Image (tube, helix red, strand yellow):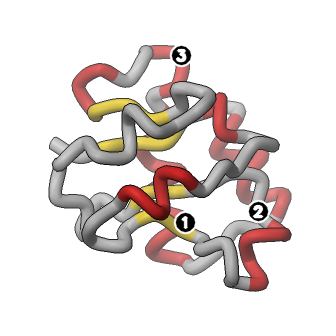
Amino acid sequence: MTYVIAEPCIGTKDTACVDACPVDCIHPKKDSPAHAEEEMLYIDPVECIDCGACVPVCPVSAIFALDDLPEKWKQYTELNESYVKAGKFTPEEFAKHATK
């Protein structure tokens, strides 16, 4: 099981989760140029060690264990994984995934 960042992160991008993560699996980093361009943060499902350290520090409750992710946000599982694999989304790609 891994963790997923879902819709409540859009527009917020609070980086408390990045700071809490012991394995540096949340992207983009606040000092990365991509941070300003992206609408939300993403968890790398391969790097995530399932520790849950990011969950309690998220001010908008956007991070869920995969098994606890609300059905209405299931597409964010693929969105997180795809972002990390591709490096970033264009706005069109983000819209395509976010509206599934």
Residue under pointer 1 = 83
93 relative to 76 in the view: left or right: right
Q: Of the residues shown, which amino acid type is indicated by label 2?
A: Glu
Q: Where is residue 18 in the image (x, y as percent from the top left)?
A: 48, 61
User: Helix or strand or loop: what does disc 2 sit on?
Assistant: loop
Contact check, label 1 and label 2, Cβ < 8 Å: yes
Q: Earlier in the sequence, mark 3 or mark 2?
A: 2
Please tell me which residue is depicted at 69% across the width and 50% down the height of the picture.
13
Residue under pointer 3 = 72
Residue 76 in view, yes or no: no
Could you tell me how far apart the alpha carbons at marks 1 and 2 are, in whole angstroms? 10 Å
Mark 1: give few (<14), some (14-19) or many (20+) Cα within 10 Å.
many
Could you tell me how far apart the alpha carbons at marks 3 and 2 are, in whole angstroms? 21 Å
Q: Nearer the viewer, mark 1 or mark 2?
A: 2
Please tell me which residue is depicted at 70% across the width and 67% down the height of the picture.
89
Please tell me which residue is depicted at 78% across the width and 46% down the height of the picture.
95
Q: Position of residue 21 (x, y in %)?
A: 34, 61
Residue under pointer 2 = 38
Please identify the quarter of the rendering in which residue 29 is found.
bottom right
Could you tell me how far apart the alpha carbons at marks 3 and 1 are, in whole angstroms? 19 Å
